[in-house]
Amino acid sequence: MNTLYKILFCFIAVSFFACDNDDTEVPERNQLTLTPSADRVVLDQTKPNEEVLTFTWTKATDIGPEYNFMYIFRLDIAGKDFETAIDPIIAEDGVFSVSFTNEELYTWIVEKWGGIAGQETTIEGRIVAKVLGPKFLYPEIVIKSVVVQTYLPQSIPLYLMGTATDAGANPSLAIKMTEVSNGRVYSWKGKLKQGNYKFIYNPASLLPSLNKGDSETSVVLRETADDPDTQFSIITAGTYSIYLSIKDMTISTNEVPYENLYLVGDATTIGWDPKGVLMNPDAANPNIYTVETTLKAGELKILTAPNWEAVTFHPTVADGSITSTETKLYAGDPDYKWKVTADQAGTYKITLNVKDKVIHFIKL
């Protein structure tokens, strides 16, 4: 009887596993393919918005009416196992390709992944066909690589003009901006009057120009005289900082609270001379002023103008510690000062946010 039970148990077990295997059997799944539009592409700085590389994929293997697929594409520099990839692109129903522009590829390769501008870099595209259905099934995955020749950004001068500037409407008097990143990011700081302004590439011509887009922070390219000549406006005259990104086609224009700040005191390299050690406003955020300088044992404070009548940034207590981040703006007394001890002496990066009244002394 025991032998009979053993035989019966084995028969049931074999039948169970056989049925289970039959139930999960799926066809061989290898129909998914991924094809780049080229094995090697050369980026063109002069055509930032032109699509230069496309990845196209096929449908995944059909595994029955109960199952659908979600297609997820990612892009990364080769060898990183997609740990530093761009955000996943989830394809809409019926979409089987994704394209990238010169600007996107340059930005990711050089600025995100640390590739060297002007050299070849291998990137990888990966498509994942995630299975959606009653049971878990592994996705189909295909990876393809492409060699990308990036460019070495060339200087592309940009000029500021308009009734808010000293150049007025005369392009030959347009004011050259500073290239923070060649051909990509520009900045300028100076006096602006009530009026309008825009940007041109050539002081001998009004076109092409960069004009106001659909908001105060967006920029559009004006190529012909038929395009709207919408310009940015200044309501109140003053000193302004302009930070313009061709990469993002965005602009930030902010009134600068102070031309510069002036670090003074016997703890500084200039002593109590009111011309001070200059702290410069950040191009992108003029509320933030920074300087890298040497500090020795002694006292210091920060003037808002190079004279003793200026309002001054101080610590909130006498002999304020440079480890504290609190500061306050005073006109006259109390004439508190930060105190640098002998063991704290060294080279520092000093950052002051004049809006939030927060200061950081970071030893380098």
Image: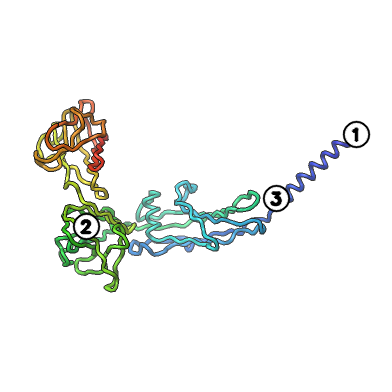
Gap between marks 1 and 3 measured at Cα: 35 Å
Q: Position of residue 27 (x, y in %)?
A: 68, 56
Residue drawn at 59 percent across, 56 percent down: 69
Q: On the image, numbered disc 1 is attached to which residue?
A: 1
Quadrant housing residue 342:
top left
Mark earlier in primary sequence (1, 2): 1
Does the rendering let one see residue 250?
yes
Q: Mark 3 falls on what kind of element?
A: helix
Q: Is residue 202 above or below residue 251?
A: below
Residue drawn at 21 percent across, 69 percent down: 205
Residue drawn at 16 percent across, 55 percent down: 237
Q: Callout 3 environment at 10 Å: few (<14), some (14 to 19), or many (20+)?
A: few
Check contact, mark 1 vs mark 2: CB within 8 A. Answer: no
Labelled disc at residue 177: 2
Q: Is residue 223 above or below residue 136?
A: below
Outermost bottom residue: 226
Quadrant housing residue 218:
bottom left
Labelled disc at residue 24: 3
Mark earlier in primary sequence (1, 3): 1
Q: Amino acid at mark 3?
A: Thr
Q: Is residue 149 above or below residue 285?
A: below
Q: Mark 2 falls on what kind of element?
A: loop
Mark earlier in primary sequence (3, 2): 3
Check contact, mark 3 vs mark 2: CB within 8 A. Answer: no
Q: Amino acid at mark 2?
A: Met
Q: Position of residue 142 (x, y in %)?
A: 55, 55
Q: Callout 2 environment at 10 Å: few (<14), some (14 to 19), or many (20+)?
A: some
Q: Position of residue 23 (x, y in %)?
A: 72, 50
Q: Amino acid at mark 1?
A: Met
